[in-house]
Image (cartoon, rainbow, N blue to C red):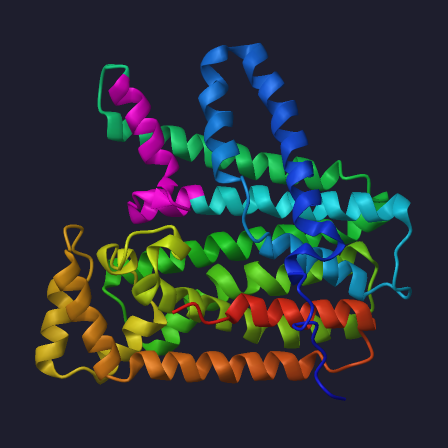
Amino acid sequence: MPAESATTNELSPFDAADLRDRVQKAIDQVLAQESSRLTAIDDDLLPLVEALTALLAGGKRLRPAFCYWGWRGALAGARPPAEIDGPAMRAAAALEFLQACALIHDDVMDGSDTRRGQPAAHRRFANLHRNHSWMGSPEHFGIGAAILLGDMCLSWSDQVLLTSGMPDAALNQAKPVYDEMRTELMAGQYLDLLEQARGGGSIERALRVVRYKSAKYTIEKPLHLGAALAGASPEIFATYTAFGLPLGEAFQLRDDVLGVFGDPKETGKPAGDDLREGKRTVLIAIASERASSTQMSAIRTHLGDPGLDLAGVGALREIIAETGAREHAENLIDSLLETSLDAMQTDVVNPEARRILTDLAHAATKRSV
């Protein structure tokens, strides 16, 4: 069966079925509701909602897209009944609150200054403390507030899913998938933290972090969540795993490359920020495995230096290129994407969803550097 694609169509696959607009509408409704609830307690809670509103404005909506089209792909007809299409979209939107939780907590753990071109949540709250000349440490206050905001997002994600309007039978099938996804995400986050504390290790260990922190959570499990909401067959779950796991790994490898070589205008982070944070990515694992003693000394000197300047970033970029780590990562991305697309060449998934999922795969791994 030839590969299907709608890449000639000007419509982004993220906008098919008006997904981004509808997800944003669902997010806005939740934020309006929770803002009223919080300000009824005290107006001092408003900055929490403002911080989250800024974080959740726009974006690709990658996880809701794979969840929604995973749901559509398991349905027999091309067009789902309107009475369940809206609830399914709202259920998919719950993943944006889970993602917000992950981003907020990840930025705290990494000590990141920015997120999507804005101050990271903990920096935002530290600035609030500083601007009001409150007592104590602005940084400590910022971290505490960000942790609480992330916890709140985790709670709201569950709430949005369970009040989405999907039938009880569908939610009962979806909840175990959702629970497993959250556990795998937190496990992956810990493994990532552990790798940084250990100073990195093998490519195999770096790939393990990729699989549990990103690949399963970003693509495979959202697809499974959609399949569960549709009451899908085991064959569809297997197809989504064969498609989603390699694609998720390719997506994270692309993110790693962008984290080192990407344009700050596109990534929303300063150039080489992953290098300053000392992230032990697959890219760094490959470079370290192939580096000469001189190159390895430079990696140890510069990687994880919060004051790393552009010259230091340039030196690490050069080592990554010279060792062939970047080329190896690009080849791995291409191979994983091919494996993923091959798995989607099946009649198990309905044709319209198969076409959109194929385009989403290309969009998730495209080169921007």
What is the total number of numbered labels drawn onto the structure image? 0
Q: Specify the principal SS of the magenta part.
A: helix
Give the position of the N terminus as an image quadrant.
Answer: bottom right
Q: Is residue 123 magenta?
A: yes
Q: Is residue 77 magenta?
A: no
Q: Residue 106: image x %, image y %? A: 39, 48
Relative depth, front residue between 212 and 17: 17
Give the position of the C terminus as an image quadrant.
Answer: bottom left
Residue 330 lies, with reference to residue 184, above or below; the image says below
Range of residues picked out in magenta: 104-131
Side of 43 relative to 284 (left or right): right
Q: Residue at x 24, y 59 (%)?
A: 278
Q: Residue 10: image x %, image y %? A: 66, 64
Q: Residue at x 29, y 26 (%)?
A: 127
The quarter of the picture where residue 51 lies is top left
Residue 199 lies, with reference to residue 23, above or below; the image says below
Q: Residue 209: image x %, image y %? A: 42, 65
Q: Residue 222: image x %, image y %? A: 65, 58
Side of 237 relative to 97 (left or right): right
Q: Residue at x 50, y 68 (%)?
A: 251
The quarter of the picture where residue 33 lies is top right
Relative depth, front residue between 205 and 263: 263
Q: Residue at x 58, y 35 (%)?
A: 155
Side of 94 relative to 300 (left or right): right
